Amino acid sequence: MTGPTSPRVLVAIPAYGSAELTDTVLADLLRDDPDLLPDTRIVVVDNAGDYELPPSALATQHQPTVYRAGANLRWIGSANGALQSAMDEGFDVCAVLNNDTRLSPGFLAGLVAPFAERPDAAIVAACYDDFWLHQRASVIPETAAAYAPQPTVREVPFCDGTAIAFSVPAIAEIGLLDTVAFPRHGYGSDIDLALRARAAGYVCLVTEGAYVSHLRRATMNRLGETSEANRIEILNGMDSLWGEDWRAQVGLSPDSFPPHNTGSGASWYL
């Protein structure tokens, strides 16, 4: 996807401290410079207010910028701010990447390619090595840099927000992530958005053309946040919006999300 038909892409990387993580994911993303999609803007959303771009990032064609809101927007606020900016400024796609990830070569082009092939796609996520089985890569490489992209795109009930891209026109239609139902970090807001997208006739996709290795909870652990509090945010938000049968709508078992998130990933599916 190059040339005049390439999409305009806004990439947001929410961060709170852990500068070494942000530096690393930026280096992975900018490894493809100048072969990134030509109309790409990369923004680090600095929620701690102390991040400085490394000189190596400033020496690239797609020079990232840093946005400081003056408060901790957390993941959901950072994502919504990026989505709103993308709508206001006429971007086609908005990608949101956790800073505790490592990216495969050619990551951004692989992540956004399905939007051209599937105009009905609202959300596309990269495959990964993390919890949700429907999003796991068919083959888990030793490192993200060793990943060989595959021409596989599959329709899924929802996408994990770890490394995710949104169709900006679709978001303009279905709305932003719900900060009322998910007021802390936004855990569960990705599931709610997927249900709203599907109800509006859109689909959610996982592509094996892009891969992330996820360190899982690197920032949350440093802040002392517990997975139990995040589980409660998911359940409270989803139950309030969709009732107690929402799990079945996304292919999950009634026993999914037990206290302290016990059990294997497979045991959570229908």
Image (cartoon, grey):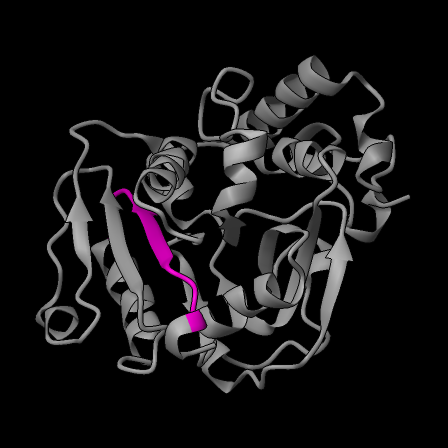
Q: Position of residue 263 (x, y in %)?
A: 78, 44
Q: Is residue 5 above or below residue 13?
A: below
Write down the quadrant of residue 151 in the picture. Answer: bottom right
Q: Position of residue 36 (x, y in %)?
A: 34, 76
Of 159 and 143, the residue lying toward us: 159
Observer able to see residue 162: no
Q: Position of residue 154 (x, y in %)?
A: 75, 63
Of 190 and 197, the residue lying toward us: 197
Q: Is residue 57 left or right of residue 104?
A: left
Of 67 and 182, the residue lying toward us: 67
Chain part drawn in magenta: 5-18
At a point 17% along the width and 49% down the height, the residue shown is: 66
Q: Is residue 115 left or right of residue 73?
A: right
In magenta stretch: residue 156 = no
Q: Is residue 155 above or below residue 76?
A: below
At a point 37% along the width and 60% down the height, the residue shown is: 8
Q: Is residue 239 above or below residue 120?
A: above
Q: Is residue 257 left or right of residue 84?
A: right
Quadrant into which the C terminus falls = top right
Observer able to see residue 221: yes
Q: Is residue 270 above or below residue 175?
A: below
At a point 49% along the width and 30% down the height, the residue shown is: 176
